[in-house]
Image (tube, helix red, strand yellow):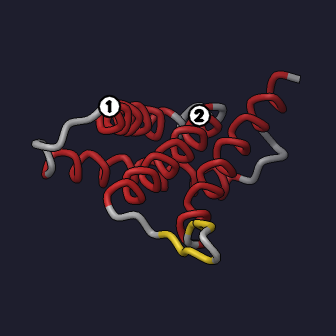
Amino acid sequence: MDTIPLWCIIFINCITLLSSVWILIYLYRNRSKKSFSTYIYGIASLIGLFLGVISFFYYICHAFCAILFGIEIFIDTYMEQKKSPVNRTYFKITIPHPSVLKGYYGGIGFIFYGIMVILYYMI
């Protein structure tokens, strides 16, 4: 625990809590739209809400919070891209917009960070 700064742990906990609350409010307002990704999104946000509170007491849970936050970012980017696709076409090749790629890379980055912290604690 001494190698990971406390501000990093608190930052990830707060981000996970705030994003989970925002997602639950968003899903409550859009109750009529039901799909598989919406259910996964809701379950991930509920788990993130509970883990965000628990991780203030047990610091190993912040790795799980980082993984869930990465999943939420990834699903949010997917749902936004599905709702209103943003693509650029150059010479009949479709290239995604850089903001879409930032969402996917950010999600993968948080997931990778969480997995590396878990592996660090296991060793």
Compared across the picture, whether 13 is left or right of 102 comes to left
> Residue drawn at (41%, 48%), measured in percent from left and top?
17
Q: Nearer the viewer, mark 2 or mark 1?
A: 1
Q: Dot 1 corresponds to which residue?
A: 36
Counting from the top left corner in percent of width and height, residue 46 is at 34, 34
On the question of residue 14 being in view, the answer is no
On the question of residue 108 being in view, the answer is yes
The part of the image, by quadrant, that contains residue 106 is bottom right
Counting from the top left corner in percent of width and height, residue 18 is at 39, 55
Q: Residue furthest right?
A: 123
Q: Residue furthest front?
A: 92
Other residues around mark 2 within 10 Å, as few (<14) / some (14–19) / many (≥20)? many
Image quarter hosting the C terminus: top right
| Amino acid at the residue labelled 2 | Phe
* Mark earlier in primary sequence (2, 1): 1
Q: Are marks 2 and 1 in contact (CB under 8 Å)?
A: no
Q: Nearer the viewer, residue 10 or 110?
A: 110
- Is 59 placed above or below 113 here? above
Q: Nearer the viewer, residue 48 or 97?
A: 97
> Residue drawn at (31%, 36%), measured in percent from left and top?
42
The residues tagged by marks 2 and 1 sit, at their Cα atoms, a distance apart of 22 Å
> Residue drawn at (42%, 52%), measured in percent from left and top?
76
Q: Dot 2 corresponds to which residue?
A: 64
